[in-house]
Image (cartoon, rainbow, N blue to C red):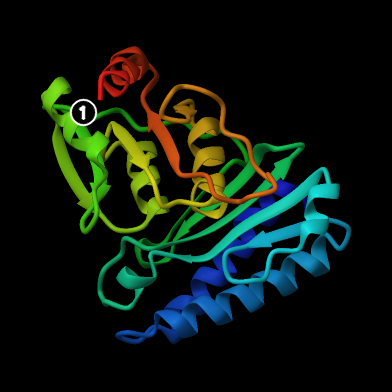
Amino acid sequence: MDDHTLAAAVAAQAGALLRKIRTPGGGKQGDQESNELLLRLLAHARPDDAILSEESADDPNRLLSDRVWIIDPLDGTREYGEPPRDDWAVHVALAVCGRPVVGAVALPAAGLVLHTGGRSARAPRLPGPLRIVASRTRAPACVDSLVTQLDAQVVHMGSAGAKAMAVVRGQADIYAHAGGQYEWDSCAPVAVAAAAGLHVSRLDGTPLRYNQPSPYLPDVLICRPSLVDSVLEALEST
């Protein structure tokens, strides 16, 4: 099984587990059980690779490895604990020498796993104004600037993975986030979005790098290639 297929398979298994045990307010149990499953599956399939997980203590030995699986066992814990919301996800990614080359984002409540294996293409955009996907509870200030300067509309959504996949799926055109994220929040979504032909970067346009000494990676931009110049220009003026 190649890395792309493995990422999709283990993300799907974690998603199935989360659906099975889902209860209102049950996010903590979901985080723990999904993490245990993913760690077990990845350790069995790739025993020589390192793992960085939101739900496990960080092992600094990962910095010595060229291959590091970066996982978020349950992205969108709040939304998961509010059935029947479907804007939560499972992230499984592999960074090789700091680059997010493999990724899978499971959207279990929607019955989907988007991944880097095989041929994938971004969906055509919907007609109408530009759509920027943002958090329903804590949208960053950069979103307000983009809405004003690009005459765009905001689509509110929960998890980072769900927001990023909304751009891949054609439900939105731009995902821009500033502050409060870590490598596990964006690594798998970035890998999947890049494989689908979308632009991925930091908010200043510089490349995203993973498996860094500090896993804090506060900002990300995912958008359609045709919008890159206008979005970066708008962000620069904020």
Residue at image point 37% right, 63% down: 88
Figure check: 39 above or below 199: below
Crowd rating for badge 1 (residues with CA inside 10 Å; few <14, some 14–19, many 20+) = many
Q: Residue furthest right?
A: 48
Rendering coords of residue 122 (x, y %): 41, 31
Instruction: Quarter of the image for the C terminus: give it.
Output: top left
Q: Nearer the viewer, residue 219 or 75?
A: 219
Residue at image point 30% right, 21% down: 231
Left or right: 213 with respect to 12?
A: right
Q: Nearer the viewer, residue 149 or 67?
A: 149
Tell me the element at label 1: helix
Amino acid type at image mark 1: Leu
Q: Nearer the viewer, residue 142 or 128?
A: 142
Rendering coords of residue 2 (x, y %): 76, 48
Left or right: 69 with respect to 140?
A: right
Rendering coords of residue 86 (x, y %): 30, 64
The quadrant in which residue 14 appears is bottom right
Figure check: 154 above or below 225: below
Rendering coords of residue 154 (x, y %): 16, 41
Figure check: 36 above or below 229: below
Residue at image point 33% right, 37% down: 175
- The residue pinned by badge 1 equals 146
Left or right: 66 with respect to 14?
A: right
